[in-house]
Amino acid sequence: MFVCWCGLNIGGVVDVPRVVEEISGCPGVARAVDYRYMCSDPGQQLIRDIIREERLDSVVIAACSPGMHESTFQSVAESAGVNPYRCEIANIREQCSWPHQNEPLEATRKAVELIRAAVEKVRGDEALSALSIPVTRRALVIGAGIAGMQAALDIADAGHEVVLVDRLPHIGGHMAQLSETFPTLDCSQCILTPKTSEVGRHPGIRLLTSSEVESVSGYVGNFTVKIRRRATYVNWDLCTGCGLCTEKCPSRTPSAFERGLAEEPAISIAFPQAVPHKPVIRPEACRHFTKGKCGVCEKVCPVGAIDFGQQDSLIEEKVGAIVVATGYDLHPKAKVGEYGYGVYPDVIDGLEFERLNSASGPTQGQIRRPSDGKVPKEVVFIQCVGSRDQENGYPYCSKICCMYTAKHARLYKHKVPDGQPYVFYMDIRAGGKGYEEFVQHATEEEGVLYLRGRVARVFQDGEHVVVFGVDTLSGKKVEIRADMVVLATAIVPASGAKELARVLKTATDEYGFFSEAHPKLRPVESLTRGIYIAGCAQAPKDIPDTVTQAGSSAAKVLTLFSAPRLSHSPTVAAVDEEICTGCGICVEACAYEARALDTRRHVAVVNDVLCEGCGACAVACPNGATRQRNMARSQAMAMIDAVMG
Amino acid sequence: MGAGEEFEPRIVAFLCNWCTYTGADLAGVSRLQYPPNVRPIRVMCSGSVDPMYILKALLDGADGVLVGGCHPGDCHYVNGNYKARRRLGVLGAILDEFGIDSRRVWFRFISASEGALFAQTVRDMTAALKAMGPNPARALWLA
């Protein structure tokens, strides 16, 4: 039993000599000693010396929080021959001396009781050794936007195979829809296509488009994933991507890639730079499937690649790590009725503006409004639509809208020099390298008019979309007879994110963004070991942050793959089979599928490597057959006795 | 307890390793001061707190029991905090039936970043228990 002074941090409040004296007589305590800095090299040596002198089989260190030095003292104990799981910490600094600085008597009494509790716990601790599990050095990346592609490339470049899955027929994600990017006004496709083509030809990346993860079983290092690859009705091995079928197809329906601003054939390649550059048939739009006749594509295909009989296929992959990069959607149309989105054709969202501005888009990059194709001379941009809106949307900031709205307004001015852009904003949040300067340029050099305030109403009046708002800086009401309105709608998690989280058995926040293990110190690790997150799947973020996080998640995967075997905490659930009745309540209580019934022997069993050691099954067990190793009921009861004096 | 000496309640606190225990550490690091009446016991999850532990503490004479877990949706173990909430709801009803005021058992969601909330919770709980007076079980069982 060792008590640390931590200089004056503990010793200045707690009467350490008195603590040592009181603890010395406790049952099971061979010796109690104090030292000024137990974590220092001489302090550690003192622990080792006394362990050897007294031939101790367990130690208690009363010092700072276990969060600080538990692993230090465990390895000190181990180096002197004590099992590291029989080393307990009594936290007499963060939870005793520091919060009770003016009550030395009470703090001393509390310290004694906390140490007694730790002594009681260590008396019941089993000598355990970390579990060792193998690791499959292949990774699954879900989502092939810029986040998923970057993670896949980094992992594959390090020499490990990657399975990259996207539910769309092509890769590139939302970035493929953007015209230019802030703050440099780089052409989005121009910086994206080097990545998409590299992913497409990388020998270490198995690309599965039109595919979705259906189930995941296993655990860190050893996941088994089932992926459903939807039928494309085109044999890609034969198809040359010539595009004749897409030209001749008689069907036309709104294109999702063009956000409904243009139509596409039922057999199509979404955009000219698409990777893979192969068409797919959408059966819901195809006359062969809906009306039972047509087959024009089949007739014109020079290589006979059309295959109406193609079926979905189920692919099973074994991987050791998973990166979730499922990206975002925009706040749906139906929910922004107040601004007439979805009602008035000239009220559009940010991604629709990107398509209008894109050289490969429906207007070949000319700014023409959807209703009549006229060039709009007055355009109102409205920020924070659905974001920072407790009542009608989401309380969070979508982070990128201030920047992309400034970008939109500037791009509009470049193409319509005599036009007037207005921006309604709440605050301008332009934190980022070169960002503030970018917004300043919009207001000072390019004549974008920023109005601080909310828009009350948007309505159609003849050819115009009238915007009623308030400029809160001047206090005046503002009425703008605009030709087009662009809404910076909130970023929301991609559809299906919550369902995917359930499949992966990891957590999302209340909005459906994937939860990170620690908001500051573990931002790319999910709450499930072996599953990492990158990009907007975790929270709204811009491209540089997304690429950074993707690289970071790849680094975490590579760290995992660099170990010969993985270690797993042994403080897992254990079953006393003598008294287990096989009732199965523990199986239901487990959130990790670590508990199962052995139907032959009629007892419940524990899969040690799946068990996270939460203790839920031990509480649920009606007759105490299940215990949590090193936090058994007897230990908890003895600790309660100890702290009750 | 002599005449004129103020009653000092004893609180046993079962704190989740991932949130409230870390929040309590943060309170200490921030030097937030709260009454020394609380005795923290670190558990891996609020969902691992057996209702028997709470009964045991109350029968041992604790005047209050605090269980600290992660906020809804934030449980490190997926849903242990919900399990705790349900169990403590049931336990409360039973305690009242047995003449132990269920208001002596507090379940609070306190995250790792809410050091101030932890300190305030201990202050509030200590004050509430002082107003309630000693746990009668102490007199019944320890007599």
Image (cartoon, coloured by chain):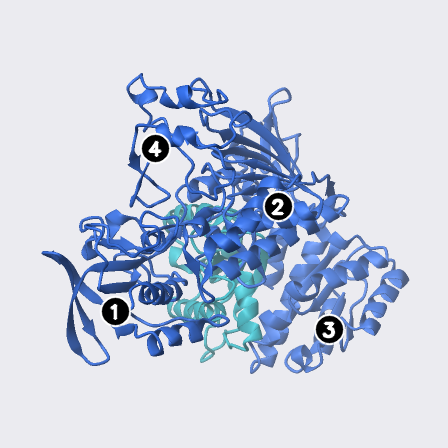
- Number of numbered markers: 4
Return the disc, 3 or 4, that comes first in the chain's sequence. 3
Residues at marks 2 and 1, CA–CA distance in whole angstroms: 55 Å
Which amino acid lies under the numbered mark 2 shown in the image of this protein?
Answer: Gly
Q: Residue drawn 82% across and 66% down?
A: A47
Residue topped by disc 2: A530
Return the disc, 2 or 1, that comes first in the chain's sequence. 1
What letter labels the chain drawn in blue? A
- Along the viewing direction, whichever of A216 and A589 lies nearer the viewer: A216
Given this view, does label 3 or label 1 mark the residue nearer the observer?
1
Return the disc, 4 or 1, that comes first in the chain's sequence. 4
Residues at marks 3 and 4, CA–CA distance in whole angstroms: 75 Å
Which disc, if any, is residue A4? Answer: 3
Quadrant where the C terminus of chain A sits is bottom right
Given this view, does label 4 or label 1 mark the residue nearer the observer?
1
Mark 3 burial class by Cα count in 10 Å: few <14, some 14-19, many 20+: many
* Residues beneath discs 3 and 2 located on the same chain: yes
Subunit ID for the residue under disc 3 = A
Return the disc, 3 or 1, that comes first in the chain's sequence. 3
Residue topped by disc 4: A265
Which disc, if any, is residue A418? Answer: 1
Mark 1 burial class by Cα count in 10 Å: few <14, some 14-19, many 20+: few
Q: Residue drawn 49% across and 39% down?
A: A166
Q: Colour of chain B?
A: cyan
Return the disc, 3 or 2, that comes first in the chain's sequence. 3
Subunit ID for the residue under disc 2 = A
Residues at marks 3 and 2, CA–CA distance in whole angstroms: 37 Å
Given this view, does label 3 or label 2 mark the residue nearer the observer?
2
Q: Dot 1: what SS?
A: loop
